[in-house]
Amino acid sequence: MRMNQAIERGSSGCAIFAALVVALVGCIGCGPEPLSAEGEGASSFGEPLRNRDWSSNGWSLATQQSGTSTVTLQVLGPPSACETRFQVSGGTSFVQRNAADRIDVSSASRSAFNPWTTLGNKTFSSRPACVTLDAPYDAGVPLTYQLAVVGRSGFGNAFWIAIWQLGQNNPYNVPPNAPSQVYDWAQVSSTDSFASAPALTAFAGNVLVVGRKSNNKLYVRSHGVVAGSSDPWGGGSWGSTYELPALPTGWTATGDPTICSAPSGLGYLPTIATRATNGGSTGYFKLSTEGTLFTAWSSISLPTGVTPASDLSMEIGKDRTRITGYFRATTGRIYQASATIGQSFAPFAVMFSNSDTFTDGPAATGGELFVDPAHMVFAKKTNESNDIRFAQSGQGIE
């Protein structure tokens, strides 16, 4: 199979390269594996999460600290969230583009979300994305509690990135302190402009930034992160921008891409997915990459008669080997399915048996530490304005 870009292999690059070769050509030393309709290994994780796997078997309102009381968490625009680290426990951070077109962040860790903090004065034209710089590492590695946030500028449509340190975690049910700035906004690239919102993940000592340009092609650029350093971002630098392979004939990327990854030591590669159109049809495609080499795109099977109305949101759960995807259909219902990373999704199924409908695409985060939930998804329910509902499996938001 053709490899689309070259890769530099240093002391740590060999392991990543070997993992990519396995993803590209299959199990080394094994016989050929039958291909599914998605063009991948026929085996998958199994069934979607069952209703009883989710706490309270339904959607709960998220809350936010306001003075000495709590109110319902409200987010402007489509929700965007990421798993974050707080000392010995995990948590979740929301980022939004506010009414003044600036970016805010609000975080929770076994608590209500803390009040919104505005991240500087720069203005943006898309919803933002975030990722913890500690994401590639398991518990026990020195953590920095730093968060990378990326948005698309209102001038020139370039991606800009800022680094903030999350506030101190507090006792159970007390929201974290406000974050503090580490690095102010800086351009991801002075030559690249985008038509989509950004997508972010952290993998193998790099932060990967993905976006769709006006030519409807997808691109990725990586910035190094130094593990164990008190200044992990400042010790790295930007690499080149790489163009992803073309989608299958007739399909055109649309909307905002998404990306997620498990810690690199497990041998799994990040997964990028995009919504795409072909005439009157809408679907999703995904591929694997470490940021410079790419597998071919494979289509994601959808239930008969179900049409996506949102971008796909993906997360890696606490077991680190399962990827779960979520989307909103034209009916307003949210569907989800899981798969072992790099393999085919099990059939998508609607979440819960009630008639709840939603107005925006969902935002999913997977827990990785201790009291984190195994899976968490946020969405805006129809007729509830900007209120945020969440569903979770396992421990997490209280």
Image (cartoon, helix red, strand yellow):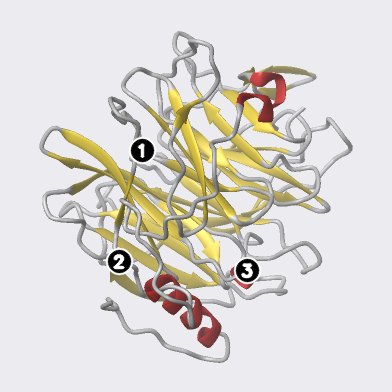
Question: Dot 3: what SS?
Answer: helix
Q: Return the mark for residue 311.
A: 1
In the rendered structure, are the residues bearing label 2 and label 3 in contact, judged by CB atoms less than 8 Å apart? no
- Residues at marks 1 and 3 touching, judged by CB atoms closer than 8 Å: no
> Label 3 belongs to which residue?
266
Where is the N terminus found, in terms of image quarters?
bottom left
Residue 168 appears in the rendering: yes
Identify the secondary structure beneath mark 2: loop
Q: Position of residue 325 (x, y in %)?
A: 47, 41
CA gap, disc 2 and disc 3: 34 Å
Q: Amino acid at mark 3?
A: Leu
- Which residue type carries mark 1? Asp
- Give left or right: position of 243 versus 91: left
162 left or right, relative to 317:
left
Residue at horizontal 61 percent and vertical 33 percent from the top: 116
Name the front one of labels 1 and 2.
Answer: 1
Residue found 43% across the figure and 71% down from its top: 23
Residue 316 or residue 155, whichever sits in front: 316
Using the image, determine if residue 27 lies above or below residue 333.
below
Q: Circle 2 sits on which residue?
A: 190
Crowding around mark 3 (Cα neighbors within 10 Å: few <14, some 14 to 19, many 20+) is few
Name the amino acid type tagged 2.
Ser
Position above or below: 247 against 28: above
Answer with left or right where residue 128 lies relative to residue 85. Answer: left
Number of other residues with Cα within 10 Å of mark 1, as a class: few under 14, some 14 to 19, many 20 or more: many
Q: Position of residue 307 (x, y in %)?
A: 28, 28
Q: Secondary structure at mark 1?
A: loop
Which is in the foreground here, disc 2 or disc 3? 3
Residue located farthest toward the right when viewing the structure as drawn: 171
Give 188 or 92, whichever is nearer the viewer. 92
